[in-house]
Image (cartoon, rainbow, N blue to C red):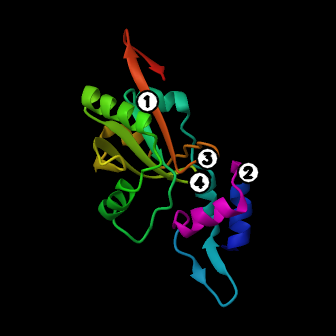
Amino acid sequence: MLMSAREACAALSPLGLSRGQGQRVLAAGLAGDPLRTRSALLYEERLVRALAERPTISWPEVHELCAAGVFVSRRTVDPTRCPAEQIEALSSGWGSVSPWSWWEMGCQIRTHGSIAFVATVAGFVVLGGDIVGLRDGSRLLIEPPGEWFGSFEGHRLPSGPGRPWVLRLGTLRLGQHAAT
């Protein structure tokens, strides 16, 4: 059964998504490729419903899985590109990250070897990697993700409104993780 883009956005709205966010999710291909008609884009209802039913990963779970920290990209990802090209596109253009946060990320990477990188579209996880280095105050050096990413795939990671990135760094104290 098919549903219009408007109906698909309405089906995603109980997740707290605005119509614009729903449209970004659909444009990113997370509900499959639409059937294009003269007057509408039509999506398979089962794919939209499956998307709406994705489980949410909580921030306490994120901190447990990624004790060194996590950098969440909330930029649009081109679904036609392969993962390596998506990572390359998402690696640069982070000049809006404050120098202090950049310095803290660098310290965490030097101490722990990497921090997690998670790309989302309206909270839906689409890509992951390990940030292993920083360059020029705006470029992330990202390698394929470690085993931790299996817990993120097929999930949602809502991060609320705000800038195109979220940075949560952690510290390890006495075997326990404490968010900073």
Mark number displayed over residue 162: 3
Q: Earlier in the sequence, mark 3 or mark 1?
A: 3
From the image, give the main secondary structure of the stretch colored magenta. Answer: helix
Q: What is the distance, in whole Å, between disc 4 and disc 3 at their CAs?
A: 11 Å
Q: Position of residue 16 (x, y in %)?
A: 71, 49
Tag 2's secondary structure? Answer: helix
For disc 1, the marked residue is 169
Task: Say how many tags the image has.
Answer: 4
Mark number displayed over residue 122: 4
Q: Position of residue 72 (x, y in %)?
A: 47, 44
Q: Position of residue 13 (x, y in %)?
A: 72, 55
Q: Earlier in the sequence, mark 1 or mark 2?
A: 2
Q: What is the distance, in whole Å, between disc 1 and disc 2 at their CAs?
A: 30 Å
- For residue 55, what is the image quadrant? top right
Q: What is the distance, in whole Å, between disc 2 and disc 3 at their CAs?
A: 20 Å
Q: Which residues are magenta?
A: 14-31
- For residue 122, what is the image quadrant? bottom right
Residue 27 is one of the magenta-drawn residues: yes
Q: Position of residue 65 (x, y in %)?
A: 41, 30
Q: Earlier in the sequence, mark 2 or mark 4?
A: 2
Query: Does 171 sit left or right of 106 as displayed?
Result: right
Query: Does 116 sit left or right of 31 as displayed?
Result: left
Q: Earlier in the sequence, mark 1 or mark 4?
A: 4
Crowding at label 1, few (<14), some or many (≥20) Cα neighbours within 10 Å? many
Under mark 3, the amino acid is Gly
Question: Of circles 4 and 3, which is in front?
Answer: 3
In the rendered structure, are the residues bearing label 3 and label 1 in contact, judged by CB atoms less than 8 Å apart? no
Query: Does 84 sit left or right of 99 as displayed?
Result: left
For disc 2, the marked residue is 14
Tag 4's secondary structure? Answer: loop
